[in-house]
Image (cartoon, helix red, strand yellow):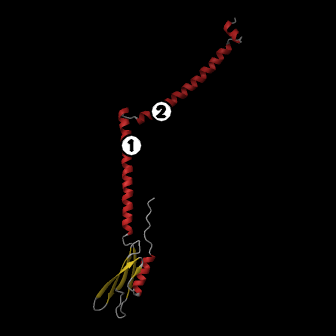
């Protein structure tokens, strides 16, 4: 019982095409199951993403997020400029300090006299010298420019200035 179509393509047994089609159907069923599983996973993700939203509202939300990001970038840049300005201002503030306490007169005890040197980042500032005696307290100030004083300094004032000059100024890192 031969078929003229099968004989024309060179197949004498009619079971071979049936077997090939059966294998193809099995392969297609496995592929279909895999695609259905993947579709369900994507559908669950999509449903969570779109929970309670329509496409138009989602588009508006994405646009609003882009606007927020732009505002954050502008705010960040403004903050950076403000911080740089504050750092420039801080360089002029007195941040190096040297203090020396001493007895100005041997009959006085308790080291009530002192010298304080206050310098900014440019090593400019002043020295305050307070001398305490039994008759009263006398306060003197001397200007410091670039780490030097035009007026001669006493030993305690020199020590206070040396302490202030050796103090490390604060290092500002903007990275």
Q: Name the secondary structure under disc 2.
A: helix
From the top left corner, tell me how far across and down residue 127 is, in percent: 36, 80
114 and 26: which one is in front? 114
Pick whichever of labels 1 and 2 is earlier in the sequence.
Answer: 2
Q: Is residue 168 left or right of residue 33?
A: left
Q: Name the secondary structure under disc 1.
A: helix
Q: Residue at x 32, y 88 (%)?
A: 132
Q: Nearer the viewer, mark 1 or mark 2?
A: 1
Placement of 141 over or under 174, stated as above or below? below
Q: Quadrant of the C terminus?
A: bottom left
Q: Residues within 10 Å of mark 1 (few under 14, many from 20)?
A: few
| Residue tagged 1 | 66
The answer to whether residue 54 of the structure is visible from this angle is no
| Residue tagged 2 | 42
77 and 134: which one is in front? 77
Write down the quadrant of residue 65 in the picture. Answer: top left
**Outermost top residue:** 1
80 and 151: which one is in front? 151
Label placed on residue 17: none
Mark 2 and mark 1 in contact (Cβ < 8 Å)?
A: no
Q: Residue at x 45, y 31 (%)?
A: 43
Q: Residue at x 42, y 33 (%)?
A: 47
């Amino acid at each position: 019982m031969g078929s003229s179509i099968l004989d024309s393509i060179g197949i004498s047994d009619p079971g071979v095409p049936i077997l090939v089609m059966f294998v193809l159907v099995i392969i297609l069923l496995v592929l279909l199951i895999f695609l259905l599983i993947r579709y369900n996973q994507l559908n669950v993700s999509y449903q969570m993403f779109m929970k309670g939203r329509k496409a138009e509202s989602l588009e508006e939300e994405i646009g609003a997020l882009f606007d927020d990001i732009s505002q954050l970038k502008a705010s960040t840049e403004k903050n950076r400029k403000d911080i740089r300005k504050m750092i420039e201002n801080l360089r002029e503030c007195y941040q190096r300090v040297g203090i020396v306490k001493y007895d100005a007169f041997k009959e006085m005890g308790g080291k009530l006299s002192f010298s304080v040197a206050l310098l900014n980042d440019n090593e400019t500032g002043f020295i305050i010298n307070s001398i305490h005696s039994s008759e009263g307290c006398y306060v003197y100030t001397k200007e410091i420019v670039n780490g030097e004083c035009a007026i001669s300094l006493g030993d305690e004032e020199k020590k206070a200035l040396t302490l202030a000059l050796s103090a490390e100024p604060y290092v500002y890192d903007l990275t």
